[in-house]
Amino acid sequence: SFPCFATAPRLKTQVCFKFHIRSMASHIVGYPRMGPKRELKFALESFWDGKSSAEELQKLAADLRVSIWKQMADAGIKYIPSNTFSYYDHVLDTTAMLGAVPLRYGWSCGEIGFDIYFSMARGNASVPAMEMTKWFDTNYHYIVPELGPDVEFSYASHKAVQEYKEAKALGIDTIPVLVGPVSYLLLSKLAKGVEKSFSLLSLIDKIIPIYKQVVAELKAAGASWIQFDEPTLVMDLDSQKLHAYTHAYKELEPSVSSLNVLIETYFADLPAEAYNTVTALKGVTAIGFDLVRGSKTLDLIKDGFPRGKYLFAGVVDGRNIWANDLNASLSTLQALESVVGKDKLVVSTSCSLLHTAVDLVNETKLDKELKSWLAFAAQKLLEVNALAKALSGQKDEAFFSANAAAQASRRSSPRVTNEAVQKATAAVKGSDHRRVTNVSARLAAQQEKLNLPVLPTTTIGSFPQTLGLRKVRREYKANKISEEEYVRAIKEEIKVVVKLQEELGLDVLVHGEPERNDMVEYFGEQLSGFAFTVNGWVQSYGSRCVKPPIIYGDVSRPKAMTVFWSTLAQSMTKHPMKGMLTGPVTILNWSFVRNDQPRFETCYQIALAIKDEVEDLEKAGINVIQIDEAALREGLPLRKSEQAFYLDWAVHSFRITNCAVQDTTQIHTHMCYSNFNDIINSIMDMDADVITIENSRSDEKLLSVFREGVKYSAGIGPGVYDIHSPRIPTTEEITDRVNKMLAVLESNVLWVNPDCGLKTRKYSEVKPALSNMVAAAKRARVQL
Ligand code: GLN
Ligand code: ZN
């Protein structure tokens, strides 16, 4: 039988007692906050909707924290973190702690409560929210602090101390976790109106006094350890930034003197200079490293680690859902033991478990074998502890051999390996995959066939997803309606969307994606090698969670995935109908990816599957095919030294999908992320015929690329209005935008389209917005 952690009984009291007295050196960097069934999400949303009280929300949050602390204690974890809970975001919590509330929220003094806190996070009736951005290369988003010379910092949220005391009252002595002062500043942006030359790091001496107050209170409450998360240490930092670390921790040293201070780093290798800086920090007694992504860090440690300091070795992956290879980790740890000493090695996670799913125990649909290969946050606690026990000579043989058996079954499973796919992928490496004709000639051939007006109009793919539509899909999935009824309903919806586009006068139509719940899930469900969880949610921002598919095996496409709907839609109109696919890089970046082969190999496999689909669409008479790469930019590695390699295989994967189509087949791609100036060469190298991109929130940025003389000869559709807002753009403003673009681009390459899909909008917004867009295109045409 398979070793299934999820079904193992939780021996709460015994386990707790037995492990506690032995005090294994185990640590968890951080833990998911949402709860195993997204309890926090629902509580937050109900509170925001005015359906429940602040007390009810606080009560639920407190219960979640207690259950997490108890779970860690029961698992035998020695260094249990506190203050890793958050009502929205831990960077926003730090902003509250420092009293760095932007003036527009009208806060002046006193402890920051829900009203100010959630206004900063989400905006309120009169003031918009603070900006949100990606937390390193994860899918988690944090609220960006807005700082400048005039910010008056004050100790305005005692959350860290309160949480420490809360755990202490349960008899659990935790390590309070704070975002470190240097990372906090490096992750901030200049407040509006602040001189560009202002150095955010110059604020360090203003925030350190607040950190000192927090530390003093934690000490008074009984804390003996404190953890500062300083993940920016893995970035490419110049010596001035590294010096900020030296300075900050020297300043903090007197107040932390009787404490053990842990600096946590994660998400990548540490550059050698950063390693030298962090290991030399004053007052710091322990350093945590991500040893899953940091194989080079491992070498640095082996070359030298300061005597007497603790090493927190992050060997259990916090970014993935795979069970740890315990034997491999154990030998890594044993090697480290000989470097740092037995009593100075602590087993830990590679980063906070925030980025993985919560508990495998709630997965009712995954089979036993697959489950034996997985570990979610709750299971990772057990892995960390098992490794710590093994290091101290109390190896749980049963646990280890069950793990080894699972690893072996995964390695040899025919569900994982598909010889034909492996062969095809191996053949792909090293080759180039380019369309034979250059893009200008292709565009000419396509124009002959498609006969489009100049400044052609189109949309990005999805049309509004009404409640009725969601219900149809849900009921079909639950077998409550027949396939026939389902097809009829979707067909009706497509008909409506096609008719609407014809009435609006759009040139290249879409079918509206009514059959799709999610652009990755839809394809994952039809490809082999993918599995789907029921509760494998990961926080994306605030109460928003995503449920990434799990890619566990070689990917192949048993049969056509979109041809039925696309050809049906094409049959309803004389206008070209865009086939609509999600690209391989986006499917990869929005999934939990297998860790037993390089990411690029998995990406190539998906690319080959999408290639088959592209060719089937072409054969079925679809002349325009869009392959979305919404998340290509997202996967860019943190370290510059690794970016070229990523871009190379990512762009190659995209080209594989469409290298074999005829010149007359027009390949579109779409990207969401507006900040793509830095990868413009790679985007051109994708060699798509037309690219539509998100742009409306940063016109200038994109224009500057072309002003600076980048030669762009493919079709391009910079979004002319923001679909994230309910606001309806006027014909004048869209015309204006188009004209601005025409100033830097040839009129024969410019397309007119919205920023992204219309899925989240209402028809009452979409109809007038698109109508104005088409009117603007027509107006601009006559002015040419
Ligand atoms: N074709 C997709 C849609 O329109 C693209 C979504 C995206 O870029 N995120 O919904
Ligand atoms: Zn988009």
Image (tube, rainbow, N blue to C red):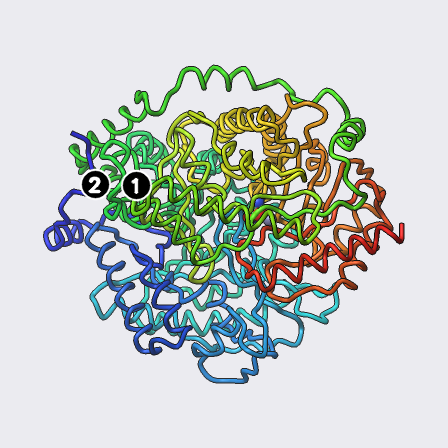
Q: Is mark 1 within 8 Å of ligand 1?
A: no
Looking at the image, the residue that sits furthest to the right is 784
Q: Is residue 258 left or right of residue 745?
A: left
Determine whether 251 is above or below 356 in the image: below
At label 2, the amino acid type is: Phe
User: Can you give x and y, in whole percent of width and height, for residue 595 in the image?
Assistant: 41, 32
Q: Quadrant of the N terminus?
A: top left
Pick the front one: 260 or 507: 507
Q: Is residue 75 left or right of residue 374?
A: left
Q: Tell me the residue at 61%/79% (across/down).
A: 103
Determine whether 582 is above or below 68 in the image: above
Label 1's element? loop
According to the picture, the residue beneath numbered tag 2 turns out to be 5
Classed neighbour count for the residue bearing mark 2: other residues with Cα under 10 Å, few (<14), some (14–19), many (≥20):
many
Q: Is residue 273 visible?
A: no
Whether pointer 1 and pointer 2 mark residues with C-beta atoms closer than 8 Å, the reply is: yes
N-term mark: 1 or 2: 2
User: Can you give x and y, in whole percent of width and height, for residue 691 in the image?
Assistant: 69, 40
Residue 173 position by quadrant: bottom left
Residue 669 position by quadrant: top right
Residue 679 position by quadrant: top right
Q: Is mark 2 within 8 Å of ligand 1?
A: no
According to the picture, the residue beneath numbered tag 1 turns out to be 375
At label 1, the amino acid type is: Ala
Q: Tell me the residue at 47%/71% (across/down).
A: 212
Q: Is residue 113 left or right of residue 563?
A: left
Pick the front one: 532 or 319: 532
